[in-house]
Amino acid sequence: MTSRTFVAVVRRDWGAASPGVAAKFAESLDSIENARMNRSPGTAVSIRLRAAARALLAIIVTAGFGSAALAAGGGLEIVVPAYFYPSSNSTLWDDMTAAADDVPITAIMNPGSGPGSFKDNNYVEAVNAFRAAGGRVIGYVHSSYGGRPLAQVLADIDKYDAWYGIDGIFVDEMANTGPGQRLDYYKAIYDHVKGIDPEWEVMGNPGTHTIEQYATWPTADRFMVFENTGEFYESYNPSAWNAEYDRDKFVHLVHTEDSPAAMESFLDLALARNAGGIYITHDVMNNPWDTLPSYWQAEVLAVAAINASFAAADFNYDGSVDAEDLQRWSAAFGRVGGGAAHNNGDANGDGAVDGADFLVWQRELGALQPLDSTSATAVPEPTPAALALAALIAVPRIVRRAGLYPLAVKADNEAT
């Protein structure tokens, strides 16, 4: 949505409820857009923007926008190390594809301890079918705990980019300590991936506890902080700093677990331990990732049941629908083509982040419980207060795009 389009929406749907503030806000956005077009930023833009923002805040408070109480828990995604070949003699990729319509799944493809030496059409077909069904695919590379030459890692990433339509990169054998040079090594991998596609995910796998600097540097979008047997998962305690981040920052892999009952218990443990990504299998060492679990369908159904207990617009899986979820929607707004995930702001599961997802957020704002499935087809007009909150989030993005982010406005935003 361009700023002019947003102005039209504000004037049409919000002006009747609060014409004075709507006019002030629309005037501010007009000024921003005109300054962007003329490339002539000035203090008048800053003054008008701050005045509109304060007025919008007043509307929001008056309309009863508060911080909804957070409920414990959140949604889960199955993260499958799909280290099995998609041949005509195997249905494993087909089984994942069938489940991708029921639960969020990210599959880690690994043709040959990396992309291999050639483009494999069997992988092309399997990956494309899986992604078309709603799944996400990231490509495996190994880093030897920072000891592998960086150029080799980057060359593997470039092969994935050239050969397969995927959604990111999985960095295995990730170091979990300093010094700074080691973090810089992984930051270089992260920057290379984001240079290919800013929407690509980087998932790092230390396989155990890691230091927070890997998150803040940054070196990855998500971290696999547990990779071990079911026996050890029962007593596992995450690092204290993990609790300060959204659950979709962390992934747990559990192998050598025969019991379907234990699998279901471990799903609850993952939620309690602030992990948004989980995979549990009966498979054992030396390669516990060369097949799907014997209880695959039960695991899919259990994750689907957990996710059904939360609102569709709870994009950060914290148990409530609020401004933080709208921030996620706003950051990914306009993403189309089937590549968007629920945690990007895709509330209706169509692979895009668009106005329909905003309407789901608007309807569920403040919800701690899911709406029934029939409500998903009703599309009400956005309320004035919801538009106000969306406006507050949209303004900084418009200003940044215009190159007009005065220090005074930035300070105001940080203060709130």
Image (spheres, rainbow, N blue to C red):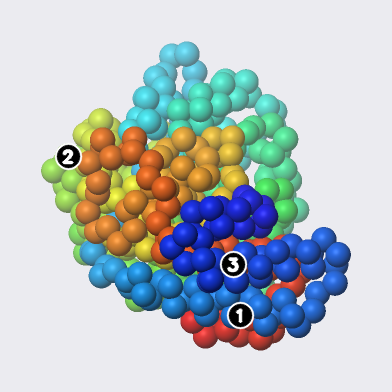
What whole-number distance in Å separates the C-alpha atoms at marks 2 and 1? 56 Å
Q: Residue 144 falls in which quadrant of the image?
A: bottom right
Vertical placement of residue 356 versus 274, above or below: above
Residue at horizontal 74 percent and vertical 62 percent from the top: 33
Residue 219 horizontal/vertical position (percent): 59, 64
- 73 or 12, nearer to the observer: 12
Residue 50 is marked as 1
Residue 371 horizontal/vertical position (percent): 25, 46
**SS class of the residue under badge 1?**
helix
Q: Is residue 285 visible in this depiction of the protein?
A: no
294 lies left or right of 4? left
What whole-number distance in Å separates the C-alpha atoms at marks 2 and 3? 59 Å
**SS class of the residue under badge 2?**
helix
- 228 or 250, nearer to the observer: 250
Give the number of the mark in front: 2 or 3.
Answer: 3
Question: Where is mark 3, residue-wise?
Answer: 23
User: Disc 2 residue type?
Assistant: Pro
Vertical placement of residue 412 versus 13, above or below: below
Residue at horizontal 23 percent and vertical 64 percent from the top: 72
Q: Residue 227 falls in which quadrant of the image?
A: bottom left
Residue 226 horizontal/vertical position (percent): 36, 58
Q: Residue furthest top?
A: 88
